[in-house]
Image: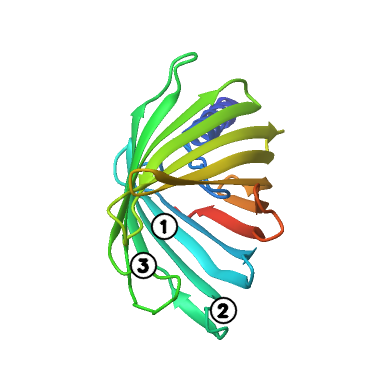
Amino acid sequence: MRKLLIFIALFGTCFASFAQTDSPTLSADRPGMATGTDVTPFLKVVWETGFESTWDGDPAFLLPTTMLRFGVTKFAELRLEYDGTFGRLYDRHWSYDVQPLVIGTKVKIFEGYKWVPKISLMANLAIPLTRVPDGFVQPHTAPSLYLLFQNDVTDWFNIGYNVGAEWSGVSHIPNTFLALCLGFNIGERFGAFVESYNYITRYGKRNTEAECNLDFGFTCLVHPRVQLDLYGMFNCQDPRNFNGIGLGVAWLIN
């Protein structure tokens, strides 16, 4: 009997250790504008949603900003994203605008080695659901393509950077998207980040306009499968005329 109890105790310890190391961990894309290189684990689903309030001359609210990510292989995921904007149009009336439905994928290309970064490729297609004159909604489908990089410098500090091309659905000339993110792990549960995300828009061959933005925030892993976040943002060139705050949650469902 004594030997049986010892065997059961050892088996239970080994099983618990295996279950702990083999269980998937949450790697959220929320919050902020930069995107990390990690993909959703195979056959797992991550739901990321939140609320965002912005000021761009008039108040606007994203209700909600939400995304589903599904791991289709060990190195790739499918993505489905939807935002709805409640704000004022140019006629000063309040309305709720259905934003384009975004479908896409993220594929991990390289796991990284020493100073060589992790690399992933992300491709999206924004499909307009409604047509609202003078609103926030694009008239045509709009693709976007990004290369995502990340260097894990230490256990508590990483550097992420993105470069991408975004089509507006209006012009055939893409906007250039550039992002640089500094991430900090504060213990096992808490994190912080600060990032610069920028758009370079070309109008014809000679006219170019650059927009520089900054956002920063905190994350809290309240459960190995649930992350809460809080962040703020502003335009570096005109912070009083464009700024905002947001909060959200990311959940590894299964």
Residue drawn at the location 43% of the way across and 21% of the way down: 112
Residue drawn at the location 33% of the way across and 73% of the way down: 129
N-terminal of the two: label 3 or label 1?
Answer: 1
**How far apart, in angstroms, are the residues tagged by discs 1 and 2?**
28 Å
The quadrant the N terminus occupies is: top right
Q: Tell me the residue that label 3 is attached to.
A: 138
Q: Which of 126 and 42 is in front in this view?
A: 126
Q: Tell me the residue that label 2 is attached to.
A: 88
Q: Which of marks 3 and 1 is in front?
A: 3
The circle drawn on residue 97 is none
For the image shown, how many numbered marks are present on the structure?
3
Q: Residues within 10 Å of mark 2 (few under 14, many from 20)?
A: some
Q: Tell me the residue that label 1 is attached to.
A: 68
Label 2 secondary element: strand
Q: Which of 3 and 163 is in front in this view?
A: 163
Residue drawn at the location 51% of the way across and 72% of the way down: 85
